[in-house]
Amino acid sequence: MTEGPPKAVVRPAPVPATWQAAPRLRRLATIGVAVFLLAVLTRHADLLLLGAPALAALAAARRGSRPETLDGAVTATPVRCFEGEEVEIVATVAAPVDEVTFRIETAPAVTLIAGPVTQVAVAGQPASARWVLQPHAWGRHHLCTVTARCTDGMGQASLTLQPERVEVFPHPPPARASLLPSDLLRRIGEHTATVSGAGIEFFGIRGYQPGDRLRDLNWAVTSRLGQPHVNQRAALRAADLVIMIDAFSDVGPPGDTSLDLAVRGAAGLATAYLRTGDRVGVVVLGGVLRWLAPSPGNRQFFKIVEMAFGVRFASEATPDLDRVPKTALPPRALVVLFSPLLDPRALNAVTDLRQRGVALVIVDVLTREPPAEPRLPFSQLAVRLWRLDRDALRASLTGLGVPVLSWDSGTGLEGAQAPLRGRRIRAVR
Amino acid sequence: MSEGQVSTRDTRTPRLGDVIIRLVAGCLGAGMILLPAVHLTGRSRILVPVGLVLVVVSLAGPVARWRIVGTLAAATAVTEAAVTRPDLAVLAWEGLLILGYLLLVDAPRGMPGARTAHWLWRQLPLAVWGVVTAAIVLVVLAIRVPVSAWLLVAGAGAAVAAVIIALPRRPPQPREPR
């Protein structure tokens, strides 16, 4: 992002407070009353000495002002960041109380990296606490919940505060714009086409024709054959990439689910292709079918990511790719589908794409097997069968001419792309 | 969904002020358990290890957040004193140890040094009031009076007054329209 990190400005807002007896009051009162009863029941006034100090402390405690509302706020800065970046959380309570104890509870897949979980502010000092969090899961979510326990005299009130939602963009893994359809666009770009043109890569040698530049003469061939020959160079063309995200299935631990991985992969590929001047679009399968027509430029990256924020939406609807307009799924585009290949609706979409005749690559984002339960007798066997079934599915897709790449979250996309390096993806019907 | 994680930097390092407060509270707690223990006999000696365990558990460990543990430790000390019936001076010391323990066991955790000192300073008036009251009650009890029932009545009145003064009053809730 070229702009500086946006600052969250949140003024403390009045929150209704319900005052209750503080634990200290309960303790002192319990001991005082117990001692008094003991003294009465045993008829030994001496025992009053045990509880008298506690009762005196109870009586001497300041009653406090106990306002009906407490001004509290929590801010998160910045409100937009990438996964793994640091977000500062500052909680403030502006109320005339004796003591404020702040306690933070982080959301799933968020790490507290600086600041004690519990922080205390005593009267006479600004009641604020600061933490630094590190989100590990993309999305638009609350990173934490802060509980502020205000103690005034022997009364206590609790406030539950939440900062505004933070937009956490997926961290794009390293990727290269090396997956290309066999038929590139007629637009000038950075990819070497399979036709001659005005690029820089060597394409071939042919006989000299009037109009050819003299500096293209291949002197070695010309002198050997006795006829003038010139070098030809490959044309440089642009490509259209459409990234499809299968949001039907979402399996795995928070922050590392198959959908997390799919969106990260999509961000990585989009970054790589947009960097080379290509147009990138996105189609989200699952929930409500949504799409974004291919477009170049850095803005497109953020558009894609913001669209991905809404993919976690459970739905039983089957996507109808016919609804996707031609501008969103251009004929010569390369389609990369990130999918765990678990839901039959995603496989139906693959069939649909094949019928449309688009160049398709599937990136399998399922990195975990179903856990085998050692106590169950056929558990291991079931996992083996599941593994064989997946192998068969991948083999059948490959047999149909749809390459299936495996990608693990621990590595960049470059490694997953390696099997298709130098190959052009053909459209298969 | 799993819980968030806590790691690195200064999140797990116990602060010095925190440690000191826990140590002092532990000493006070051990003192209130051990002071009447010398007079314990027979099965009542079981109260000593029970009380010490409760004191330790109330200050450290996962159960420390259960506030009843500290109350139970103080109640154990009261029971010991009721069983042994030591001298008035010992009872007065015992009461002050119980008060000190109850004040410190509530200390919020994770305070830096300056805030710890500030927090302790704010507890001083309560401790002073406890000492003064213990001294007054000690003097009153040391002087033999023929009728002790009045003393009990006075004590009961003081307790009721203390509760009335200290207990917070909940503001009246507006009735919701039907």
Image (cartoon, grey):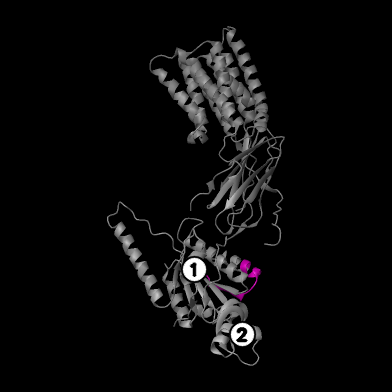
Q: Position of residue B65 (x, y in %)?
A: 52, 36
Precedes in sequence: disc 1 or disc 2 = 2
Asked if residue B38 shows in the view, the reply is: yes
Q: Secondary structure at mark 1?
A: helix
Q: Residue at x 38, y 18 (%)?
A: B43
Left or right relative to A94: residue A39: left
Number of numbered callouts drawn: 2
The spot of residue A264 in percent (x, y) is 54, 63
User: Closer to the camera, A111 or A56?
Assistant: A111
Q: Is residue A296 magenta?
A: yes
The chain identifier of the residue carrying mark 2 reads: A
**How many C-alpha atoms fall within 10 Å of the one at disc 1: few (<14), some, or many (≥20)?**
some
Q: Quadrant of residue A140?
A: bottom right
Q: Amino acid at mark 1?
A: Gln
Do the residues at discs 1 and 2 belong to one chain?
Answer: yes
- Left or right: A412 with respect to A2? left
Callout 2, which amino acid? Leu
Give neighbour class at mark 2: few <14, some 14-19, many 20+ (Cα, 10 Å): some
Q: Residue at x 56, y 43 (%)?
A: B8
Q: Is residue A62 visible?
A: no
Q: Which residue is mark 2?
A: A217
Instruction: Magenta stretch: give its range.
Output: A287-302
The residue labelled by disc 1 is: A417
In the displayed structure, A418 sits above or below A191; it is above
Q: Image quadrant of residue A6?
A: bottom right
Assign a secondary structure to mark 2: loop
Q: Is residue A396 above or below residue B32?
A: below
Mark 1 vs mark 2, foreground winner is 2
